[in-house]
Amino acid sequence: MISILLAGAISMVLTLVGTRGAITLLARRGYGQEIRDDGPTSHHTKRGTPTMGGTVFIVATIVGYFAAKIFTGRAPSASALLVLFLFAGMGAVGFLDDFIKIFRQRSLGLRSKAKLAGQTMVAVAFAVLALQFPDERGQKPASPFISFIRDIEWLHLLPVLVVIWILLLIAGMSNGVNLADGLDGLATGASMMVFGAYTLICIWQNNQSCATAPGSKCYEIRDPLDLAVVAAALTGALFGFLWWNASPAKIFMGDTGSLSLGGAVAGFAVMTRTELLVLLLGGLFVIITASVILQVSWFKITKKTGGVGKRLFRMAPLQHHFEMLGWEQVNVVIRFWIISGLCVAMGLGLFYAEWVAG
């Protein structure tokens, strides 16, 4: 428990202090955000705000985790290192995207195929490695089963299908957080709630682990306590970053941050055997992604059938629809945080109810 608290505290302090320095450095170098011309006009005032802030909480999370391990004298686990690898790897893809935007002074960075290729390489490497490294009980970081709150025994997949399934989960969640990152503090606050939930889930799974407390209700998870340390480090880092990212944002996380956070959410879902439950825990990201899919699909259908494309929303992703309706950005963010909090609460409630029902 000390390592969990320590990781969270160290990473929070690092982002509180480090983000202030990053703002100064990025502003001095002119590393400002480019704004899409087809976005809400109110966003044009944000042009030039320092971006790539995700770099700060990526570094803070990694340092916070390893500092906690050094302090407690415990070796890092395979599960924790794999989540950190996925977190940093997806962040590296986002960093390239952000850097190209800044270097070429345009709102679009990596080409879609190049960005997808980068995400795929990191995700496939994570999936393949997660099926290795069995512990003394033969438990591996990832499972060949699709899971909800535990492995679903009749949904056993061949190794190649496991890799594809994990790839889809990572791609969906990373792009979901990326789509949510459109308003000051929205993605940061929502992600912070999800990682806070995973901290609690991992602590509970450790207390009821089949390795230490075998029984009909125990959890077959490889390294639940060490995963809780990573989740706490992420939660603390985002607390510190939100201080500077809240409206009016002094810095944006950029794709560096959003892709890394989405990857980490998916990584925790895989490691904790909550792959379908994450659709509820990260419900806000699912809703926002669905709004884009519906908008594009409806436009194509109406254009094909009637000759003129129509839109379901004034603008997608969904948060911009409410901006176009006249809502203040801060109101949209707070109300979407409430939705995210409700999704997290329902997910945790369902997780606990499953254990009680047994």
Image: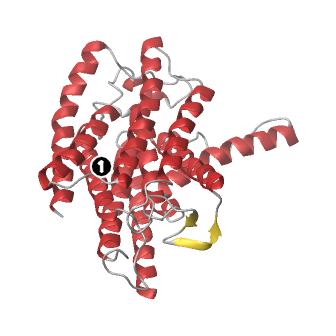
Q: Quadrant of residue 313?
A: top right
Rendered position, 18 above or below 74: above
User: 10 Å neighbourhood of mark 1: few (<14), some, or many (≥20)?
Assistant: many
Residue for point 15% across, 54% down: 73
Whole-percent x, y for residue 305 in the image: 87, 42
Residue for point 38% across, 24% down: 45
Query: Which residue in the protein does label 1 denote?
Result: 234
8 left or right of 349 in image? left
Q: How many marks?
A: 1
Residue for point 27% across, 34% down: 56
158 or 154, nearer to the observer = 158
Whole-percent x, y for residue 40 in the image: 50, 31
- Is residue 320 visible in the rendered image? The answer is no
63 left or right of 269 in image? left
Look at the image and name its color scheme.
Answer: secondary structure
Whole-percent x, y for residue 229 in the image: 26, 56
| Amino acid at dot 1 | Leu
100 or 283, nearer to the observer = 100
- Is residue 100 visible in the rendered image? The answer is yes
In what quadrant of the picture does the N terminus appear?
bottom left
Residue for point 37% across, 66% down: 136
54 or 216, nearer to the observer = 216
Rendered position, 84 above or below 194: above
